[in-house]
């Protein structure tokens, strides 16, 4: 792991103020979240939300799904396309076409594979490079608490293009795929790569702290979003196609991390995941619905700032003491139920707390 931090071009290891001791009542992660002060929460801009209304269910119940789009510098070519598709009202009238158990729910144009019947895409959509599955980290400044506890280490990261983000490290090197962190509320993996154009082609364990590292001279390391439950990705055909954003899916099963850096993650469901995960499974190959009658129509998709009466949402800030305490509790439960604290936690088992904001 020390090799990786040197590859990240760590600027310094600073001492941050000591994290407050957990109050006696804060015995579980939920206790930490419930006790987090108002200043530990950050609002999500309504303009960064997609509001997808499905056709009502058989009982007439409305079904709404709210998706938060991922911020810069991650996946912005696809995110820009999604915004254009919403503005063109392109998603209105498409459908959920696939529900595969323990994997994904997918939606798009049911006739999308038939050029004669496919719904025309709006003009101006970007063709996004495979290189954009990752974002280059240019520098990192590590911050530990005053006792130097590596388990509570945090980082300030500067990405190519000037974006600066705050990260909470989750796994330095014992994750089976890569080191992991939460970057301003989003789970990420990190590691050195030969280059953005040849990622996944290094020898040994590609891109994941390989024994033989050949790192692009102008880039120290990379970060990329990971496939956790409820996260939204872009459907595509075989490489070099990367998808436009016209076809999307949400993870509804065990985190399929093998898709990381192979498909673009563009957001996450923050409300209404049950309206996707509880849909009947498709009986066709890999969960596709066989008949039009099985599909679930999508009535409309709008940006959050276009929807009257939409609640405001907020997430527990990555740079807050409450979040550090929350991560520690996820990894080290010590209460009446747990016998052996795990001493670690998978990044997808640290769901970032998101809630409706108080008026």
Image (tube, rainbow, N blue to C red):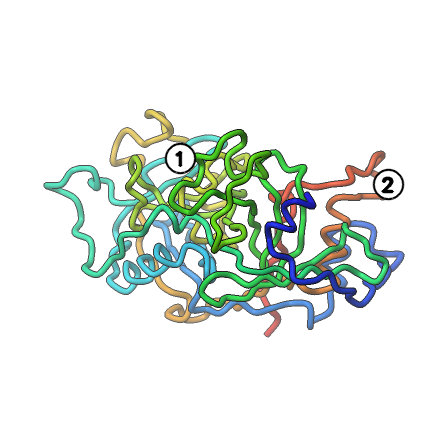
- Identify the mark nearer the N-term, 2 or 1: 1
Q: Which residue is mark 2?
A: 336
Residue situated in front as seen by the camera: 177 or 218: 218
Q: How far across and down, in percent of the image, does residue 266 sit?
A: 42, 52
Going by the picture, which residue comes out furthest to the bottom? 359
Residue situated in front as seen by the camera: 85 or 92: 85
- Quick check: can you spot residue 230? no
Q: Give the number of the disc on residue 99.
A: 1
Q: How far across and down, in percent of the image, does residue 158 sit?
A: 55, 63
Q: How far across and down, in percent of the image, does residue 187 sit?
A: 57, 50
Q: How far across and down, in percent of the image, does residue 9 sit?
A: 61, 56
Q: Is residue 301 left or right of residue 122?
A: right
**Helix, strand or loop at disc 1?**
strand
Quadrant, the N terminus: top right
| Image point (69%, 71%), residue name | 38
**Badge 2 density bin: few <14, some 14–19, many ≥20, Cα 10 Å:** few
Going by the picture, which residue comes out furthest to the left? 116
- 84 relative to 216, above or below: below
| Image point (28%, 42%), residue name | 241
């Amino acid at each position: 792991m020390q090799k990786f931090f040197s590859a990240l071009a760590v600027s310094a290891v600073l001492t941050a103020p000591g994290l407050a001791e957990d109050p006696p009542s804060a015995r579980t992660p939920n206790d930490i979240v419930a006790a987090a002060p108002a200043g530990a929460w950050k609002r999500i801009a309504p303009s960064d939300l997609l509001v997808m209304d499905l056709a009502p269910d058989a009982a007439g119940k409305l079904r709404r799904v709210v998706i938060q789009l991922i911020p810069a510098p991650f996946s912005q070519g696809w995110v820009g396309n999604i915004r254009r598709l919403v503005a063109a009202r392109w998603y209105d009238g498409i459908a959920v076409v696939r529900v595969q158990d323990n994997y994904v729910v997918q939606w798009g144009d049911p006739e999308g594979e038939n050029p004669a019947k496919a719904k025309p895409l709006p003009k101006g959509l970007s063709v996004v490079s495979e290189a954009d599955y990752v974002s280059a980290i240019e520098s990192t400044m590590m911050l530990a608490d005053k006792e130097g506890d590596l388990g509570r280490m945090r980082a300030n990261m500067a990405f190519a293009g000037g974006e600066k983000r705050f990260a909470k490290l989750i796994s330095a090197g014992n994750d089976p795929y890569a080191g992991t962190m939460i970057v301003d509320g989003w789970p990420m993996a990190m590691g050195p790569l030969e280059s953005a154009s040849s990622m996944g082609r290094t020898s040994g364990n590609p891109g994941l702290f390989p024994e033989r590292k050949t790192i692009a001279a102008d880039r120290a390391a990379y970060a990329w979003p990971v496939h956790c439950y409820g996260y939204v990705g872009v459907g595509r055909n075989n490489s070099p196609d990367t998808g436009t954003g016209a076809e999307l899916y949400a993870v509804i099963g065990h985190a399929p991390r093998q898709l990381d850096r192979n498909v673009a993650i563009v957001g996450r469901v923050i409300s209404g995941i049950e309206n996707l995960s509880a849909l009947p499974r498709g009986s066709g190959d890999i969960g596709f619905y066989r008949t039009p009658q099985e599909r679930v129509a999508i009535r409309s998709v709008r940006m959050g700032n276009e929807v009257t009466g939409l609640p405001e949402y907020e997430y527990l800030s990555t740079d807050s003491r409450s979040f550090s305490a929350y991560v520690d509790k996820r990894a080290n439960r010590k209460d009446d139920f747990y016998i052996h604290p795990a001493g670690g936690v998978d990044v997808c088992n640290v769901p970032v707390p998101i809630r409706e904001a108080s008026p």
